[in-house]
Amino acid sequence: MLGMSLGMLVETLVAVLLATTIGYCIVLNQRLKRLHGDRDQLRKMVADLVSATTLANAAIQELKATAQEAEIGLEARLGEAERFGIELANHVTAGQQIMDKIARITSVARNGQPMEDRLAEPNKVQSALQQLSMRPRIRGNAA
């Protein structure tokens, strides 16, 4: 009887160990399923990250191209503005010279110099009058 009860004890112990092993295998199987599910989610996240990176690189390239186009346009406008500035400075200088000549002509006319003195400098007065008469034509051509 002792032999039988020892055999029964061993078989019971083996049955308990088998039941524990089966239970552990079930728990391990569930963990592996979750791990595989997480792996699939991780793959999706990596794919989304790669897609977002690709879109960001494309956007950066477009921004670079736009910045280069804007730079070229601004350089052209700055060059044009500089040319207009130089032209405007030339017109201001020419206008100042004309104003000086008009001031000299009016001072001569107001001072009432004798006719001989006026006739002594007809070239200057005549030259100033000619330049004044030509000025509207010059301005029309410049504009």
Image (cartoon, helix red, strand yellow):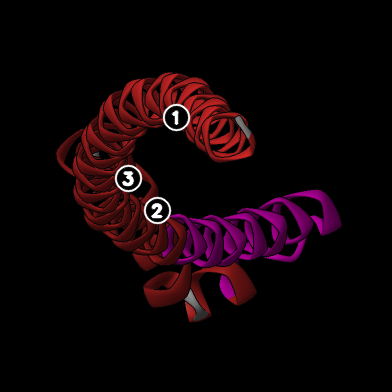
- Which kind of residue does numbered mark 3 sit on? Arg
Image quarter of residue 18: top left
Overall secondary structure of the magenta stretch? helix
| Crowd band around label 3 with a 10 angstrom C-alpha radius: few (<14), some (14–19), many (20+) | some
- Counting from the top left corner in percent of width and height, residue 95 is at 53, 55
Q: Nearer the viewer, residue 44 or 49?
A: 44
Q: Which residue is mark 2?
A: 81
Q: Residue at x 55, y 58 (%)?
A: 92
- Counting from the top left corner in percent of width and height, residue 9 is at 61, 32
Confirm whether the magenta stretch covers residue 25. no
What separation in Å lies between label 1 and label 2 (alpha carbons)?
A: 92 Å
In the rendered structure, which segment of residues is drawn in magenta? 88-116
Quarter in which the C terminus is drawn: top left
Residue 135 image label: 3
Q: Nearer the viewer, residue 136 or 86?
A: 86
Image quarter of residue 42: top left
Res. 134 in view: no
What separation in Å lies between label 1 and label 3 (alpha carbons)?
A: 116 Å
Q: Is residue 29 above or below residue 63?
A: above
Mark found first going from the N terminus, 2 or 3: 2
Q: Is residue 142 left or right of residue 118?
A: left
Q: Which residue is mark 1?
A: 18
Res. 107 in view: yes
Q: Nearer the viewer, residue 41 or 78?
A: 41
Q: Nearer the viewer, mark 2 or mark 3?
A: 2
Q: How many numbered discs sit on the rendered protein?
A: 3
Q: Nearer the viewer, residue 132 or 93?
A: 93
Q: Residue at x 37, y 75 (%)?
A: 123
Confirm whether the magenta stretch covers residue 93. yes
Q: Is residue 117 left or right of residue 17?
A: right
| Crowd band around label 2 with a 10 angstrom C-alpha radius: few (<14), some (14–19), many (20+) | few
Mark found first going from the N terminus, 1 or 2: 1
